[in-house]
Amino acid sequence: MPPNPPPRTQGSAVALRHVAKTYRTGTVEVAALKDISVDIPFHRFSMVIGASGSGKTTLLNLIGCIDAPSSGEVAVCGEDVGKLRDNALSDFRARNIGFIFQSFSLVPVLSAYENVEYPLLLVGTPAAERRERTQVMLEAVGLSGQAKQRPNELSGGQKQRVAIARALVKRPQIVLADEPTANLDSATGLAIIELMRRVQAESRTTFIFATHDPQLISHADEIFAIRDGMVIEHRGEDHRAALGIGAAQ
Amino acid sequence: MTLLFKIALRNILRNQRRSLMTGSAVGAGALAMLLFGGFAAYIFAGLETGNVQQLGHLTVFRNGYFLFGGGNPAAYGIDRYQEAINLIRSDPTLAPMINVITPTQSLTGIAGNFSAGVDASKTFLGIGLIPSDRDRMRQWDAFGIGAGRSADARLSDQDETLGLVGFGLARILGLCAPLRLSDCPPAPSTSPDEAATASSGVNQEVVGLAAAEGLGQSDGKPGLPQIALLSATAGGAPNVVNLTVSGAERQGAKELDDNYVVMNLALAQQLVYGRGEHKVTGIVIQLHRSQDMAAARTRLIALFKQHALDLDVRDFKELAPFYGQVVALFSGIFLFIALVMGVIVLFAVINTMTMNVMERTNEIGTVRAMGVRRGGVRMQFILEGAAIGAAGATLGTVLALVIARLVNGAGIQWVPPGNSSAVPLHLDVFGSPALVIGAWAGLVLVATVAALVPANRAAKLSVVDALRHV
């Protein structure tokens, strides 16, 4: 597997063209996404917001190359991912995309250190570099003291920090986070948001969130509001005022 | 791969009870296979040792003897047999393989005991051999099972009249008391009429012939009974000799026990060939190692062809089909046990791995999202199945070795099939590395194959569906 490419500075991190996604449940077809065409820029803290069932997670899944659209084209980091076969898609995810899940989704039998190290093993990072980057990442999320602890020995906030470190350690082009603060209390959630904001600023990684957490939304650079499977609004820098959320808290 | 191993081992330890139960099933399989396999290996070694001690590995006959010689052994005698023995013994290929090479004479006839008021006769199946060669053959113990026997003083190269009979024949001929045999009831007394009838038949002929040949009942050794052996010579004339019975030996089969006579080769030749040329019906070859049997046989056939000798070679498995039957029976039982254990292990591992996949569906989705390929997920669960199999099989193997050692040291006695006396029970697990490795590897393979089904299911999971799984 080739080493990670340098962060992109031109074009869109994600380009969706007339993307639709339909689920079939028995004889019933449910349209989760309808003809979506959006461009999500690089190096931004972008949020896909909307109510439950609006299609946020489906959109994130398509961007994360873990689901395929029923129609339309999805380009991630300039790559038309619809043309990639399963193994190539896996490799593409391993190199370019980091995931942060609502339920943390750490591998329970691995320590915090091993969980963070895991993505580096997948891209074949040499052992010495792997050790260094893992330790640096754990320090960055404030968990160097908990490196040997397993997920069941960590608090919710600590688990999410490990998940953030795991997503970022391989220096991906894009980090996708699906409701990353939903399972955390507000204080911990805020700390996690600030952490992500800080590492995003430092690493200039593209963050794309699916959320309806106002606390998180207030930190967004870009907002894509989605309802009934359609993007109904896209706002850039002026979104906070427009949405009446106020300044960053 | 290191990470896969790490995750596999930790998941096995994480689900301790489940892993223990599945590992125990694999261990029980290994235990059953190894203990029975060790027992069967011991049976095979014991049976082969017994046959090789008695029959040698190979026997050279005149062509046709093996199929038709039983009806008239004398007609298939090998003439100038000593030259044939010398030829074999001097062959550079065969010489290093051979432990004992010795001539034998098979014969049939009627044995009678008319001493001390006993009036009994019985057909017999006899073998004439060289006692010192017999002693050397009986020491063969290539498997190291302690079956080598000491020299039998009841037979002697020097005293050609000494011989042994089957325990049953001794009983029928009324030799229990003279031979001081225990568990040997005397023959029931017969009415004067019955005695007269019997005496007027075959017995009278034997007695008459013995008298004509100048054989008297007083020629025997002090304290040892004598019997008369009647047979037809190669020329068809009746002949009779006296045999001093120095002991009785139990034979594994009653039919043989009631007919068996062992005597010195010279006496057998005297009975079968009289004053004519003394031949033998077989040249028995005992090798140092059974593994050389095929090579020795091939060489013998080539040698006989080269020297235009009308000779045939048979191995002990052909001469004693019981050996093959026992091997087939025990092999069949072993295969059955292995199959049953294999099926149990198969389903136990499938069940455990299916539960593991179900419980870890979200984890599967997570690692797939992170970039692990389907093959990586498949390998993860296959490794876990194989690791459970390996741990269980190792546990079972260790237990089997411990139990085998305990049993072997306990001095338990039993009577093997075809044997006439009890021998120590031995489980030859230690001496069968192929069995240990085969059983271990077989069970690990079954566990690995069993894990394939749930592993494939895990690999085929949709990432999105797996991530949604709670």
Image: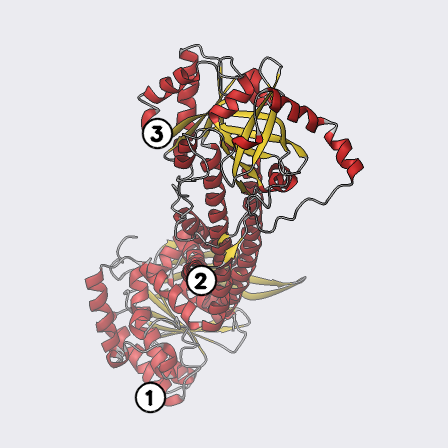
The amino acid on which the numbered mark 3 sits, given as a three-letter code, is Met
User: Which residue is the site of mark 2?
Assistant: B410
How far apart, in angstroms, are the residues tagged by discs 3 and 1?
95 Å
Read off the chain for label 1. Answer: A
Q: Which mark is residue B97?
A: 3
Callout 1 crowding tier (Cα within 10 Å): few <14, some 14–19, many ≥20: few
Read off the chain for label 2. Answer: B
Circle 3 or circle 1, nearest the eye: 3
How far apart, in angstroms, are the residues tagged by discs 2 and 1?
82 Å
User: Which residue is the site of mark 1?
Assistant: A249
How has the structure been colored for display?
A: secondary structure
Residue at the spot 23% in from the left edge and 77% down from the top edge? A139
For label 3, the SS is helix
**Between B352 and A162, which is closer to the camera in this rendering?**
B352
Q: Position of residue B52 (x, y in %)?
A: 46, 36
For label 1, the SS is loop
Read off the chain for label 3. Answer: B
Q: Is residue A12 visible?
A: no
